[in-house]
Image: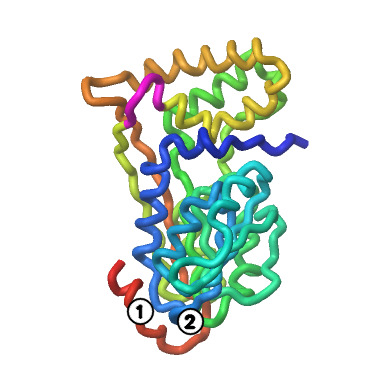
Amino acid sequence: MQAAPTWDPQQYLRHSTHRTRPFLDLLTRISGLPGGAEPRIADVGCGPGNVTALLADRWPGARITGYDSSREMLTAAQRYAGPTAGGGAMDFRRADAAVWSPEEPYDLIVSNAALQWVPGHADRFPDWIGHITPGGTLAFQVPGNFDAPSHALLAELCDAPRWRSRLDGHGRRYVHILSPGDYLERLTGLGCTDVDVWETTYVQLLQGEDPVLEWTKGTALRPVLTALDEDRAAAGEFVGQYRDLLRKAYPAGPHGTVFPFRRIFAVARTPGGGTPPAPTPEEAAA
């Protein structure tokens, strides 16, 4: 069994503007939570808490709990814990999304770029939906770019003779996502209403030296860096080979490096609850 990757919150946040935008786009599709101005919200895979804090901007009176399996990420997230400016509260707890089961009803369960790390995550949907207040919402977004050069080249390099036995599967593509149509079928089959599934490719312009490598150091490359953590020479060799491949796949241009990134989104209202409540002022303004 592979060890869980060790996360680096500061590395992850290096491209925080680009990583945050999909979450903001997801939030615009969520409204009319049963909890009104004081909804109960769970953020599954909250990471360093920066996007969890955006939930308090959208629902100022919300009671929000962020869940993550990484101690490093939770330590970084603690800066946001406590009462919020709008009269709500935010806290963070350690939990593995692969087995997490809500201990109380939530008006919204949301996840941002986390479920791709969880094999069989769609099998968790029945339990999560069963713990969402009738008429509440399940919403998530996951990367859908596992066939892009950034990930395909990483998988090929991990399978090369030099690294195959050394990495023992670490760093190979985490293709734990479903197609947009499969998510639609799963959520509709669970009785959800107003199911909205879509995909977007963000054509991002990254700045700096080897920006795609720096991006993957915060996400896809973490399992490799974790596996080679005690052998700096090997880690340096692997990263150097991967860097050279990325430079050819994503050449720097006069204004930066173009890095297209596809993402899949889903928003589903849980069964029951009657007519959805009117949006709060913050929801209406979103």
At 59% from the left and 13% from the top, the residue drawn is 236
Estimate the x, y position of residue 223 in percent, counting from the top left.
Answer: 63, 31
Taking the image as shown, residue 4 lies to the left or right of residue 194, namely right
Q: Distance between the residues labelled 2 and 1?
A: 10 Å
Residue that protrudes farthest toward the bottom in the picture: 274
Answer yes or no: is residue 115 visible: no
Quarter occupied by residue 159: top right
Q: How many labels does the image show?
A: 2
Q: What is the crowding at mark 1: few (fewer than 14 residues within 10 Å), some, or many (at least 20)? A: some
Range of residues picked out in magenta? 206-211
Q: Residue furthest left?
A: 254
Q: Is residue 235 magenta?
A: no
Q: Earlier in the sequence, mark 2 or mark 1?
A: 2
Instruction: State the quadrant of the N terminus.
Output: top right
Foreground pick, 50 / 126: 50
User: SS class of the residue under badge 1?
Assistant: loop
Mark 2 element type: loop
User: Where 92 falls versus 212 (above or below)?
Assistant: below
Residue 262 x, y percent position in the rendering: 39, 43
The residue located at (41%, 54%) in the rendering is 23
Quadrant location of the C terminus in the rendered image: bottom left
Identify the residue under disc 2.
34
**192 relative to 28 in the view: left or right:** right
Horizontal arrangement in the rendering, residue 139 relative to residue 126 (left or right): left
* Residue at (55% x, 74% y) in the render: 40
Task: Name the dominant secondary structure of the magenta segment.
Answer: loop
Q: Which amino acid does label 2 sit on?
A: Pro
Toward which corner of the image does residue 144 lie, by quadrant?
top left
As drawn, 42 above or below 198: below
Residues at circles 2 and 1 in contact by the CB criterion of under 8 Å: no
Question: Hey, which residue is sitting farthest right in the picture?
Answer: 1
From the image, tell me which residue sits under label 1: 279
